[in-house]
Amino acid sequence: MSDQPNRPFTAAAFNRYLAEHKLMASRCPACDALYLPPRAICPRCQGDALAWTELSGHGRLAAFTSIFVAPSGMIAEGYSRDNPYVAGVVELDEGVKISARILGVDARNPAAIQVGTPLSVEFLDRGEGEQKKTFLAFKA
């Protein structure tokens, strides 16, 4: 799952992978530590020969919140007090965690959402042309 192009370990490179519908992390070949978001230097052994690694995109819901007061970008997508959305922390099968939007759950009924729910990665493409952006989400 490695052998990816030699890209720098930056937010821009991570976002470029998202636009390619790939969920990528960095792995340290010296101590086998995995990092998401990716890092250029391993905090565990201080190794600097990290490599991009594609993740499975499968995991479980570790924590979540229903958001009723949305920021402007989410309001533009139709979210509001009457149409909340869920954001959460996903623990991937590889052991790393990342925050993302959670789809396929009832944001209006947070009591029905269960920590531990199995999730799969979804890539949300918004806009067109040079304005196109891809956002990370996970679906129950």
Image (tube, rainbow, N blue to C red):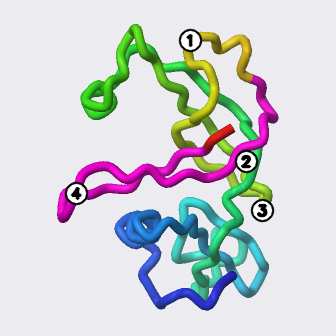
First reached walking from the N terminus: tag 1 or tag 4: 1
Q: What is the number of the mark on residue 91?
A: 2
User: Which of the two discs, 4 and 3, sits closer to the camera?
Assistant: 4
The amino acid pointed to by label 1 is Arg
By secondary structure, the bulk of the magenta-drawn segment is best described as strand
**Mark 1 and mark 4: Cα distance apart in space:** 30 Å
Label whose residue precedes the other's in the sequence (1 or 2): 2
What residue do we see at 64% from left, 65% from top? 35
Instruction: Say whether marks 2 and 4 touch (CB < 8 Å).
Output: no
2 lies left or right of 6: right
> Farthest residue toward the left?
130
> Which tag is nearer the camera, tag 1 or tag 4?
4
Q: Which residues are magenta?
A: 114-138
- The residue where tag 3 is placed is 94
| Amino acid tagged 4 | Glu
| Circle 4 residue | 128
Between 31 and 9, the one lying in front of the other is 9
Q: Is residue 60 left or right of residue 48?
A: right
Q: Nearer the viewer, mark 2 or mark 4?
A: 4
CB under 8 Å between discs 1 and 4? no
Residue at the disc numbered 1: 108
